[in-house]
Amino acid sequence: AQSVTQPDIHITVSEGASLELRCNYSYGATPYLFWYVQSPGQGLQLLLKYFSGDTLVQGIKGFEAEFKRSQSSFNLRKPSVHWSDAAEYFCAVGSQGNLIFGKGTKLSVKP
Amino acid sequence: DTEVTQTPKHLVMGMTNKKSLKCEQHMGHRAMYWYKQKAKKPPELMFVYSYEKLSINESVPSRFSPECPNSSLLNLHLHALQPEDSALYLCASSPSRGRSTDTQYFGPGTRLTVL
């Protein structure tokens, strides 16, 4: 069955520190992968997506993600976190028009 | 422009009320979605419209009634809701429907409270 796992429920990082959010997927065919961010009480904003080609994908707000087929992973990274990055982050895989979401990782940022 | 708008932003209603949520997009997208999101959970798909026709109804109770008057508008009519229906209701749209590469763009949501 198709699924997405985000192993970390909650991560706290200091402002200015680097960030990596983990995402693992289980999908039989070529995965089409997405990262969304949701600020409290807001909708989901698309950060980046991977369909094919270069396995390092650049997104908005200084985020990037790397697709590693051998590890079934699509981890999200940012070199220097800002306080405004505090939010919930969802990884998802596209499946025939539907999105299969992970349970999300909440990011807190310490001053 | 990748904007999906939703109104109202907040809605409080009693269990006997009838209300509607509205969603609009002007990106020329041909698929539109309703999701329900409870606190600390990912969104759950409720309905999908493709080319203004209902293509998916994820076993949602009949007290939720979707409507797609045209390709830019999506409504969700609410009647006789229960307190457990309180949630954030998200609308999304995508250029097409049925492909794994369909990218969905979400609106800001309507925070619904049922008393």
Image (cartoon, coloured by chain):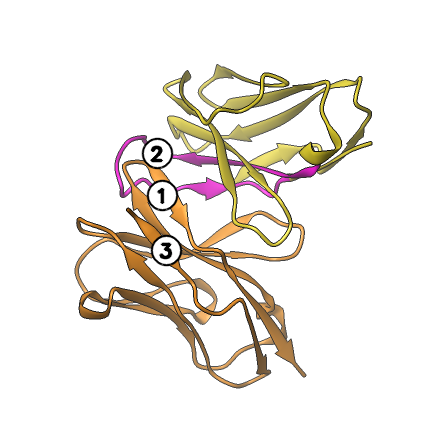
Chain colours: A orange, B yellow
Residue B1 appears in the rendering: no
Q: Quadrant of residue B104?
A: top left
As measured in the structure, the alpha-carbon distance from the residue carrying label 3 to the one carrying label 2 is: 24 Å
Label drawn at residue B31 = none
User: Which element is circle 3 on?
Assistant: strand
- Please state which of the two labelled residues, at mark 3 or mark 1, is closer to the viewer: 3
Both marks 3 and 1 on one chain:
no
* Magenta region, residue range: B86-109
Is residue B95 inside the magenta stretch?
Answer: yes
Per the image, the residue denoted by label 1 is B103
Per the image, the residue denoted by label 3 is A4
Q: Tell me, yes or no, whether the two marked residues, 2 and 1, touch with CB atoms within 8 Å.
A: yes
Residue A76 appears in the rendering: yes
Q: Where does residue B109 sit, x and y in percent of width and height?
A: 62, 40
As measured in the structure, the alpha-carbon distance from the residue carrying label 2 to the one carrying label 1 is: 7 Å
Residue ID at (36%, 38%): A98
